[in-house]
């Protein structure tokens, strides 16, 4: 699919429990907050629709920095599956695929998001990223999987859908690109 046929859902509703009292998504790294650096790689990709799922306490956060996104609030703290479901449900009904991206992965390259779209060649496609031997986000799903994605709940994400797919497609990413920010130590060792 082309990005113009694809929706984007950025999952930014996590609790940041392992990070401490601060919100890891708004912690500063080179170039801005974790979330703004992540979103900057998406700015000039012309997705059909961009949705950001935000958490329980959005007050006082710089959401204006994310022009072009529609926001959906997940009131269930720590419910990754629920965030996926809410984000996919909020997409424009004309989207033929969706890319699921994590707000705490600021180093994923723009080209990776485009590759995920392009590898999602039909409505039954599922594309996952592979780093070393691990499979995971960001991912892409053809429209045929939207109903199952919208039924996710609790803290289990989309892996329960892609793990059993018979024709899983892979986009290879390198270790630095797959790095996420979960702890203060992760932040302190950022490039």
Image (cartoon, rainbow, N blue to C red):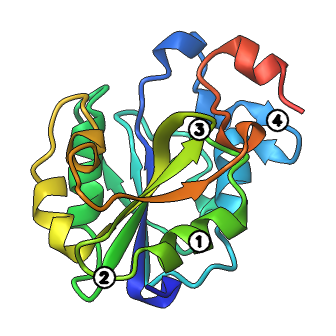
Tag in front: 4 or 2: 2
Q: Which of the 4 quarters of the picture holds residue 124? A: bottom left
Q: Earlier in the sequence, mark 1 or mark 4?
A: 4
Q: Is residue 74 visible?
A: no
Residue at image location 48% in from the left, 74% down from the top: 119
Please say if 178 is above or below 123: above
Kindly identify which residue carries mark 2: 122
Discs 2, 3 touching: Cβ within 8 Å: no
Horizontally, is 139 left or right of 104 in the view?
left
Q: Position of residue 55 (x, y in %)?
A: 38, 38
Secondary element under disc 3, as helix, strand or loop, is loop
Pointer 2 local density, CA inside 10 Å: few below 14, some 14–19, many at least 20? some
Q: Earlier in the sequence, mark 2 or mark 3?
A: 3
Residue at image location 49% in from the left, 57% down from the top: 170
Q: Which mark is residue 104?
A: 3
Discs 1, 3 touching: Cβ within 8 Å: no
Discs 1, 4 touching: Cβ within 8 Å: no
Secondary element under disc 1, as helix, strand or loop, is helix
Cα distance in 3D space between marks 1 and 2: 14 Å
Q: Earlier in the sequence, mark 4 or mark 2?
A: 4
Residue at image location 22% in from the left, 32% down from the top: 76
Q: Earlier in the sequence, mark 1 or mark 3?
A: 3
Kindly identify which residue carries mark 4: 29
Q: Quadrant of the N terminus?
A: bottom left
Q: Position of residue 58 (x, y in %)?
A: 45, 41
Q: Which of the 4 quarters of the picture holds residue 178? A: top right
Q: Which mark is residue 115?
A: 1
Q: Position of residue 23 (x, y in %)?
A: 58, 26
Secondary element under disc 4, as helix, strand or loop, is strand
Tag in front: 1 or 4: 1
């Amino acid at each position: 699919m082309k990005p113009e046929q694809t929706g984007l859902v950025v999952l930014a509703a996590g609790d940041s429990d392992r990070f401490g009292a601060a919100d890891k998504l708004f912690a500063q790294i080179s170039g801005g907050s974790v979330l703004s650096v992540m979103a900057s790689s998406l700015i000039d990709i012309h997705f059909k629709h961009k949705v950001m799922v935000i958490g329980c306490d959005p007050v006082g956060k710089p959401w204006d920095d994310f022009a072009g996104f529609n926001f959906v609030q997940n009131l269930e703290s720590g419910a990754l599956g629920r965030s996926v479901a809410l984000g996919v449900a909020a997409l424009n009904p004309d989207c033929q695929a969706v890319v699921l991206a994590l707000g705490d992965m600021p180093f994923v390259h723009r080209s990776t998001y485009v590759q995920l779209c392009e590898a999602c060649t039909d409505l039954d496609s599922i594309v996952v990223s592979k780093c070393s031997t691990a499979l995971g986000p960001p991912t892409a799903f053809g429209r045929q999987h939207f109903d199952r994605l919208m039924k996710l709940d609790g803290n289990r994400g989309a892996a329960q859908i892609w793990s059993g797919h018979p024709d899983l497609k892979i986009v290879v990413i390198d270790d630095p690109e797959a790095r996420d920010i979960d702890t203060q130590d992760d932040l302190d060792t950022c490039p």
